[in-house]
Image (cartoon, rainbow, N blue to C red):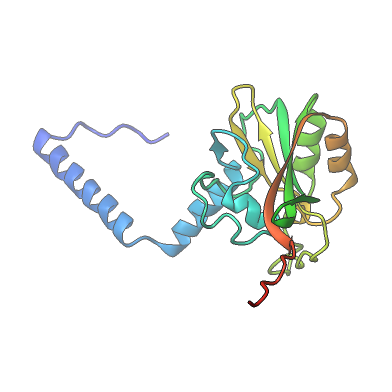
């Protein structure tokens, strides 16, 4: 503990306050790259940001599911935070799993769909599995291996009792088969609601060619 210093005169305190304010403003305008990187790492370690609710059609989620640009022109679904670890102090009571693989057909043709599944039950084994599973590339690998075109993809939200949600990082970015512990944690939950949303037209319906007069 640092020993207390003698109380400075009021004028000296004002001068010190001015110097401190100038230093803060200088730091904000210039910024030390190393310090900024450390701050970013600290924020990442703190866990994912909390959103007002889970959304499987948010632009960032669609991109993670392989539908890059599918939500670029949409204003109905706002941006959501990037994925991250489960933040300390966040108590999940349910989950929303966003997955690919389903198709829907309407008058326009065949659509690739996103499936939103609301899961309820004891989420503690799932949270434990997510905390233990590696979610980043192995050491020495700059980026994870590309996800195959036909590989299933998933994005996961954990939801608390008030409906607030966090996008949590899945192993391998949610591409392909999930680790056994994570799959078992998901399988142990009850699917209480399942919705399919058309996202990308992959098979337009053929239309009759116009005939000449």
In the image, residue 114 lies at what x, y percent? 72, 48
Q: Quadrant of residue 69?
A: bottom right
Residue farthest along the left direction in this orientation = 11
Give the residue displayed 73% in from the left and 69% down from the top. Answer: 140
Where, quadrant-wise, is the N terminus in this rendering?
Answer: top left
Q: Which residue does the image show at 14% across and 39% down from the upper left?
A: 14
Furthest-top residue in this view? 161
| Residue 145 place in picture, x, y as percent | 77, 67
Relative to 69, does residue 121 appear above or below in the rendering? above
Q: Which quadrant does the C terminus fall into?
A: bottom right
* Left or right, residue 156 beside residue 79: right
Whether residue 127 is visible: yes
Q: Position of residue 70 (x, y in %)?
A: 61, 58
Q: Is residue 116 above or below residue 209?
A: above
Quick check: 196 left or right of 163? right
Q: Position of residue 81 (x, y in %)?
A: 55, 46
Relative to 6, 122 lies left or right: right
Of residue 193 and residue 82, the one placed in the foreground of this image is: 193
Q: Residue 165 versus residue 101: which sits nearer the camera?
A: 101
The answer to whether residue 87 of the structure is visible from this angle is no
> Residue at point 79% right, 65% down?
149
**From this viewpoint, which residue is outermost toward the front?**
213
Q: Nearer the viewer, residue 100 or 24?
A: 100
Tell me the quarter of the picture where residue 92 sits. Answer: top right
Count up the numbered dots: 0
Q: Which residue is painted at 72% across and 33% down in the image? A: 95
């Amino acid at each position: 503990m640092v020993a207390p210093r003698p109380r400075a005169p009021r004028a000296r305190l004002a001068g010190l306050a001015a110097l401190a304010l100038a230093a803060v403003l200088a730091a904000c305008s210039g910024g030390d790259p190393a310090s900024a990187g450390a701050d970013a790492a600290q924020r990442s370690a703190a866990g994912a940001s909390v959103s007002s609710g889970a959304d499987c059609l948010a632009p960032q989620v669609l991109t993670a599911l392989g539908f890059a640009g599918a939500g670029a022109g949409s204003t109905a679904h706002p941006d959501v935070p990037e994925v991250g670890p489960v933040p300390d102090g966040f108590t999940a009571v349910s989950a929303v799993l966003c997955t690919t693989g389903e198709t829907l057909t309407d008058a326009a043709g065949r659509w690739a769909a996103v499936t939103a599944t609301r899961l309820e039950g004891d989420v503690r084994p799932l949270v434990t599995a997510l905390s233990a599973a590696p979610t980043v590339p192995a050491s020495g690998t700059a980026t994870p291996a590309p996800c195959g075109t036909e590989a299933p993809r998933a994005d996961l939200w954990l939801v608390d009792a008030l409906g607030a949600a966090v996008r949590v990082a899945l192993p391998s970015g949610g591409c392909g088969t999930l680790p056994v512990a994570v799959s078992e944690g998901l399988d142990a939950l009850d699917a209480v609601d399942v919705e399919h949303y058309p996202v990308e037209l992959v098979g337009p319906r053929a239309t009759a060619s116009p005939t000449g007069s």
